[in-house]
Amino acid sequence: QVQLVESGGGLVLPGGSLRLLCTASGISVNDYTMRWYRQHPGKERELVAEISGAGGRTNYTDSVKGRFTISRVNAERTVYLQMTSLKPEDTAVYYCNAIKVTYGVDYWGSGTLVAVSS
């Protein structure tokens, strides 16, 4: 059974940092494209960052480029999202996703809340 568990969310001041973790069981994180999404209240879920399975290539949405870094540790089956220079508009529930597009396989975690506020 595949499970993705997010952790590391919380309340942080503007300009602060947080590191989110996505710990996987039942899969190897280097076999999937691993993604972090976020969902602001009342809005659709948006893709924030991804790291490809094969080559470890990373991509980011424009609003987080230079501030967020996605990485993984295969042996720990964990994907990280290091977030710096946080802004109030980064407040959202952050979700981990594992996907193999060509196989139509798609797994989700239950999310972790990040709140950026003074």
Image (cartoon, rainbow, N blue to C red):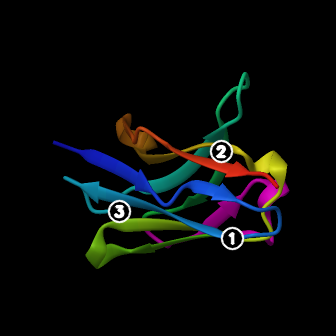
Label 2 Cα neighbours within 10 Å, binned few <14 / some 14-19 / many ≥20:
some
Q: Can residue 74 be seen?
A: yes
Q: Is residue 57 above or below residue 24?
A: below
Residue 17 badge:
1
Q: CA distance from mark 2 to mark 3?
A: 18 Å
Residue lying at the far front in this picture: please name it.
118
The residue lying toward the viewer, choosing from 18 and 94, is: 18
The residue lying toward the viewer, choosing from 97 and 6, is: 6
The reply to whether the C-beta atoms of the residues labelled 3 and 1 are less than 8 Å apart is: no
Q: Residue at x 37, y 67 (%)?
A: 78
The reply to whether the C-beta atoms of the residues labelled 1 and 2 are less than 8 Å apart is: no
Q: Secondary structure at mark 1?
A: loop
Q: Position of residue 2 (x, y in %)?
A: 22, 44
Q: Is residue 73 magenta?
A: no
The residue lying toward the viewer, choosing from 8 and 78, is: 8
Q: Residue at x 54, y 55 (%)?
A: 9
Residue 91 badge:
none
Residue 47 badge:
2
Q: Which residue is mark 3?
A: 29
Question: Which circle, 3 or 1, is nearer the viewer?
Answer: 1
